[in-house]
Image (cartoon, grey):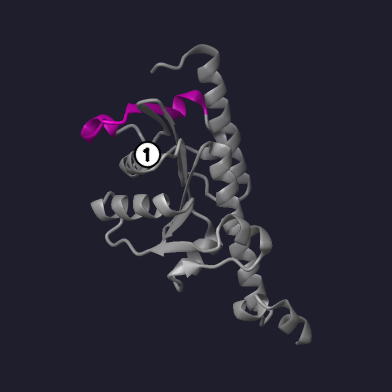
Amino acid sequence: MKMQGEAWQKLAGEFARVGRVLFDARLNNTHSGNMSMRVQDEIVITRHGAMLGYLEEADLVVLGLDCSGEDTAPASTEFELHRSIYLATPAMAVIHTHPRTATALSLIHNEIVPIDLEGRHYFPSVPVEEVDPYSGSEGAKQAVALCLREGPIVVVRGHGAFAAGDSLERCLQLSHSLEWSCDILQRCRELGISPDTMRNPDQARDK
């Protein structure tokens, strides 16, 4: 690992800070999700089974971009998918979350279209990818990486979201904004307001 001393401690601190926000925001449960950063030709990624809300330096695994097979065992099981994203995009960070509302909506939609202004600012629509079987499959790696070449975030149907950006904080912002938009969308539906009506505020006020 080329990064040492104060630089490494700062990086580890950023992982811990973002992981805690992800957990507190309920974007992951105690042991779900994973995060990584690209540092030149290496990937720093959370270990398999790490609690993102309580990360320590020992929970970070450093692997080369060309690492594969048994050498990746200590890392998150999503390591190869993260690597595929780095090889296919200019991303410097990746966050995988299990947002409940977004995951639920992915079961009935092929894309998620925000109706709130902030969500529409960040992503006019979010693709939902059907990947079966999912875990560790070549199809999953290719599908997710391809989507993240076109936009900053994607949802894998029934599984969760992957966000890519220039920093962990940017990925956190995208991940939280997606779930926030999905929650607003679901609340409007519970109120009997259709998404089409919400895109025309005059119709909504007339009801």
Residue that lies at the very extreme toward the top in this rendered image = 5
Find out whether residue 59 is within the magenta segment: yes
Q: Which quadrant of the figure has residue 177? A: bottom right
**Tag 1's secondary structure?**
helix
Label 1: few (<14), some or many (≥20) within 10 Å? many
**Where is residue 140 shown, x and y percent of the image?**
31, 54
Q: Tell me, yes or no, if residue 149 can be seen here.
A: yes
Find out whether residue 105 is within the magenta segment: no
Q: Residue at x 57, y 30 (%)?
A: 14
Q: Which residues are magenta?
A: 56-72
**Where is residue 95 shown, x and y percent of the image?**
48, 43
Relative to residue 137, is residue 17 depicted above or below? above
**Where is residue 165 shown, x and y percent of the image?**
50, 42
Which amino acid type corresponds to the residue marked 1 in the rendered image? Tyr
Q: Residue at x 33, y 27 (%)?
A: 63
Q: Quadrant of the image for the C terminus?
A: bottom right
Q: Nearer the viewer, residue 201 or 143?
A: 201
**Which residue is labeled 1 in the image?**
86
Q: Nearer the viewer, residue 112 or 89?
A: 89
**Where is residue 35 shown, x and y percent of the image?**
46, 39
Residue that lies at the very extreme toward the right in this rendered image = 205
Q: Which quadrant of the figure has residue 61? A: top left
Q: Residue at x 60, y 38 (%)?
A: 20
Q: Quadrant of the image for the N terminus?
A: top left
Q: Which quadrant of the figure has residue 204? A: bottom right
Q: Tell me, yes or no, if residue 157 can be seen here.
A: no
Relative to residue 80, is residue 122 depicted above or below? below
